[in-house]
Image (cartoon, rainbow, N blue to C red):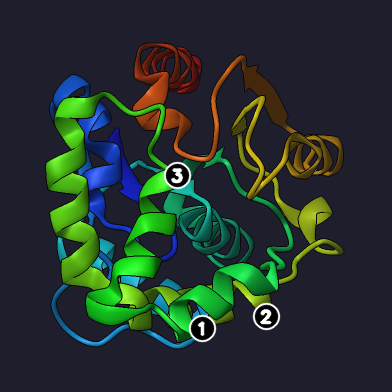
Amino acid sequence: MKLVFLHGAGSSSLSYYYQLRHFRNSKAIDLPGHSTGTACTNIDEYLQWVRGFITARRYKNVVLCGHSMGGAITLLYALRYPEELKGIILLGTGARLKVADEYLDICRKPGPDNSKWLNKHMKNFKGVPEDMHPVITQRALEVGPDVELNDLLACNQFDVMDQLGKINLPVKVMCGSDDEMTPVKYSDYLTENIKNARETIIPGGTHYVQMEKYKKVNEEIEEFLASLK
């Protein structure tokens, strides 16, 4: 089995740092524009790019794990090309990803040297071990507010709420109990409307639960992978 991770809006493969260390043969993809190349303008384009990446490398028995916007790409992959996947993991995401205006506004007016934007961006990582903060800051600046705005606008257009019943793959849904960006009700909706979905809510986790509560997240992924064998 090949475990492939997809990051969220304005983020990068770094958001799976603790998973890559744990799952030796796994791959976390840096989506185009994060930070090299040109970002895609909608979830559909990201899907086609990811599919091309996976096909070119001839990965077999793929388990796709998507966080936030990466979860949107994962859902679309499961709807369009289910025969290419063994199962999916949905992490802090939803079937519809409406973005609050405050997140869009700060990307549009990031302040001198992107300082206002960076300050808000880094608040998402309060619960992440402090030794990671310098490298997260550096990567955030490399990706920048324009790419994050692009991604958030792509998320804003995404909606597969009425299509979830068509997904017929094993599905693991995870969310931090204190996630404000993609709250628990989003995960509940996914679990209630996808036939084979199992849900775990992780106490004390926020939007970057895979970095904050990585031991628990890794344990849940391990159990899910074992169930597919």
Name the element at disc 2: loop
Picture coordinates of residue 199 (x, y %)? Answer: 69, 24
**Which is more foreground, mark 2 or mark 3?**
3
- Do callouts 2 and 3 mark residues in contact (Cβ within 8 Å)? no
Picture coordinates of residue 19 (x, y %)? Answer: 26, 28
Amino acid carrying mark 3 in the image: Asn
Q: Residues within 10 Å of mark 2 (few under 14, many from 20)?
A: few
Q: Which mark is drawn over residue 157? A: 2
Residue marked by disc 3: 124
- Do callouts 3 and 1 mark residues in contact (Cβ within 8 Å)? no
Determine the image quadrant of residue 127: top left
Picture coordinates of residue 43 (x, y %)? Answer: 52, 76
Name the element at disc 1: loop
Q: Is residue 101 above or below residue 38?
A: above
Q: Is residue 163 visible?
A: yes
Determine the image quadrant of residue 103: bottom right
Picture coordinates of residue 11 (x, y %)? Answer: 33, 59
Query: Nearer the N terminus, badge 2 or badge 3?
Result: 3
Amino acid carrying mark 1 in the image: Asn
Amino acid carrying mark 2 in the image: Gln
Tell me the CA gap for discs 3 and 1. 23 Å
Q: Nearer the viewer, residue 152 or 121?
A: 121
In the image: residue 210, left or right of residue 43: left
Q: Residue at x 53, y 40 (%)?
A: 207
Query: Nearer the N terminus, badge 3 or badge 1?
Result: 1
**The N terminus sits in image quarter:** top left
Q: Residue at x 20, y 20 (%)?
A: 22
Residue marked by disc 1: 42
